[in-house]
Amino acid sequence: MFPADLMDLMQKLFPLRRYLCSPDYDKAINLIADIIPLRQHCFSRDETVNHWQIPPHWDYKTARICRNGNCIYDASECPLQIIALSTSFQGTVSREQLRQHLHFDHRNPNWVPWHFRQLYRPWDRTWGFCVTKEFYDSLEPGDYDVEIETVESDEPLTVIDYEIAGKSNKTIALVAHLDHPHMANDDLAGVIVGLRVMQLLVEKERKFTYRLVIVQEIVGSEYYLNKMRNSGELKHLFGGLFLEMLGTRTPFALQSSFNGNSPIDQAIRNTLNTSNAKWSEGPFATVIGNDEINWEAHGIAMPSLSRFPYEQYHSDHDNMDIICPKCLEESARVV
């Protein structure tokens, strides 16, 4: 049975506006810190690493569309309804102008998509909303009043980790990303599974040291790895596993490391082969691309284990309704 305290934590973390740098991301860190003695690594926006740039600490107060004095769309209902890192905007626009700033999910007319592009291009930003295709199509000709009020600051990006020592200082890293607001499987499920794995490892006699690293996708890993290299800690990291989208009833998908035959690859294959789980395997960068790219670039073999693909990916239907506690526990036990 999956522990009640971790399910409770997941319920608390799910609705938060967990953008890369945001008040709710900071709140999420504090909630996790109530459970484990984590380290915090803070990175200034003035610091550029391998051409990556940390986005501003960002949140929004108001994001709505009105017509004839009536609010017809209010993004306060779900943080996916405003594009991440939207700029502030207030004005009256035509339907055609408004539609240029609306994004919908092409898979399902009733889903709201996750628009994340500006998090990785903070120097090239505009305002906008994510809506259903049904809403997009329902707009009649005429003028619309748009009001978006955002709040920005230069507070740092914070990566957290938690280590359990073994007999050797050779370290295996388990990595998951905590960003993606109001989504449960991607990758909050990976974070929760990682916490569960660490609970299980504490009870075991350990040859290796294990480190859970919780990051902001891609950007967090790059800054963290650069710090580990400069501090000399990187030399102790000899392999890792990326934990991604592990909370649904979808079969496991193993994506091998770049080498394809690292000790972690072999261990995961052996475990999956001897388990009752359904699973498949794909070469590096063919199943789903995430932070394993950064880790491999720093010389750390990093296969990933996920339950991808699943239907609700990158939409407002990636919620707690699709999370299976039994699957979370199975994922943790396999790892």
Image (spheres, rainbow, N blue to C red):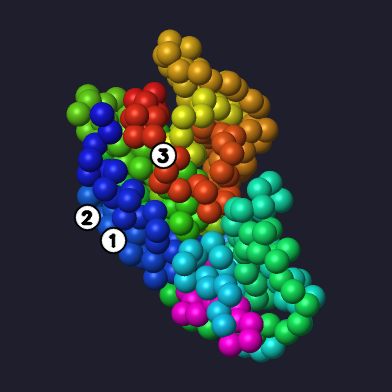
- Three-letter code for the amino acid on which mark 1 is drawn: Asn
Q: Position of residue 171 (x, y in %)?
A: 38, 35
Which residue corresponds to mark 1? 30
- Residue appearing at x 29%, y 53% in the figure: 32
Q: Is 226 or 15 nearer to us in this picture?
A: 15
Which residue corresponds to mark 3? 323
Which residue corresponds to mark 2? 34
Q: Is 6 or 296 nearer to us in this picture?
A: 6
Q: Is 323 or 71 nearer to us in this picture?
A: 71
Q: Position of residue 239 (x, y in %)?
A: 47, 32
Q: Secondary structure at mark 3?
A: loop
Q: Secondary structure at mark 2?
A: loop
Q: Are marks 2 and 1 in contact (CB under 8 Å)?
A: yes
Q: Earlier in the sequence, mark 2 or mark 3?
A: 2
Q: Nearer the viewer, mark 2 or mark 3?
A: 3
Q: Earlier in the sequence, mark 1 or mark 3?
A: 1
Magenta span: 51-69
Q: As displayed, is residue 223 above or below residue 174?
A: below
- Residue appearing at x 43%, y 52% in the figure: 178
Q: As displayed, is residue 170 above or below residue 75?
A: above
Q: Position of residue 17 (x, y in %)?
A: 44, 64
Judged left or right of residue 246, residue 193 is left
Q: Is residue 96 highlighted in magenta?
A: no
Q: Secondary structure at mark 1?
A: helix
Q: Nearer the viewer, mark 1 or mark 3?
A: 3
The residues bearing labels 1 and 3 have C-alpha atoms spaced at a distance of: 23 Å
- Residue appearing at x 26%, y 48% in the figure: 8
Q: Are marks 2 and 3 in contact (CB under 8 Å)?
A: no
